[in-house]
Image (cartoon, rainbow, N blue to C red):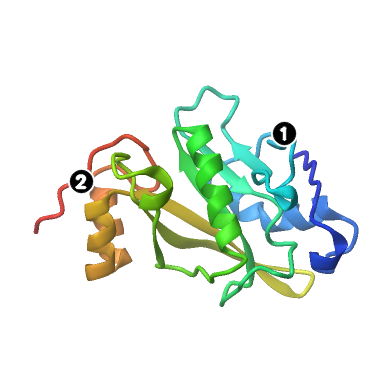
Amino acid sequence: MTLGINGPPPLIMKSVGKDYRRFYKELFQPLEDQIGRLDDETIMPLVGFEAGGPLSLCTIGRHRGNKFVTYVSCELAIRNDQRTGECGSYEVLITCDDEKWARSILTKIGRMSLEAMFEDAHTLDIGAWVGDEHPMQGILFEELARVRVDGAIHGIMCCHAVTRSELEFARREGADKLYERLKAAGVYPKSATTRPSIPLSS
């Protein structure tokens, strides 16, 4: 894995030493164990996140002809201004069939994470970001991993794209019940951005 991390200015960075590659190698080990080997190249924006640009992202499966690619941010967990909960500072991840959409949504979530705390089973309405006509209207957060690096806890938060009816179901019945139905429908854990809503009746 080659991490070309620009990194935020020192004033908002955690003390992770100078070895960012080692930090992220340890943090991302659960991804390699559960999903697959990280690709060698990192998606790096021309304008960095700190200057208003998109997040830098590591990927799994981007150059292997996969329909669904896993995208994971690689510059949030080293910040000290992220709003954190039980899993500590964290990176955000999505397995998606639309790179442009994934980058946009993860970047917006990354910015929100500096103001709001996201934890396992939290939901987020993204209708204002994507418009009423887009099939995916919400995000369901799932803690994918929690890792201790240099004595501190850090996490990886998986973002599942869901339709409006699925978002409302998760808020009413709970995330676990929606996951069960997404798995039964063959949807979980991939976010297909143009799929219809799954049946939700009992």
Q: Are marks 1 and 2 in contact (CB under 8 Å)?
A: no
- Which kind of residue does numbered mark 1 sit on? Asp
Give the number of marks. 2
Q: Is residue 158 left or right of residue 192?
A: right
Residue 136 occupies quadrant:
top left
* Residue 201 visible to an observer of this rendering: yes
* Distance (Cα) linking label 1 and label 2: 35 Å
- Secondary structure at numbered mark 1: loop
Q: Residue at x 43, y 48 (%)?
A: 129
For disc 1, the marked residue is 40
Q: Is residue 199 above or below residue 91?
A: above
Farthest residue in the left direction? Answer: 202
* Residue 34 visible to an observer of this rendering: no
Q: Is residue 199 above or below residue 154?
A: above
- Which kind of residue does numbered mark 2 sit on? Ile
Residue 112 occupies quadrant:
bottom right
Q: Earlier in the sequence, mark 1 or mark 2?
A: 1
Q: Is residue 96 left or right of residue 5?
A: left
Question: Of the numbered discs in the image, which one, if any, rests on residue 186?
Answer: none
Farthest residue in the top direction? Answer: 65
For disc 2, the marked residue is 198
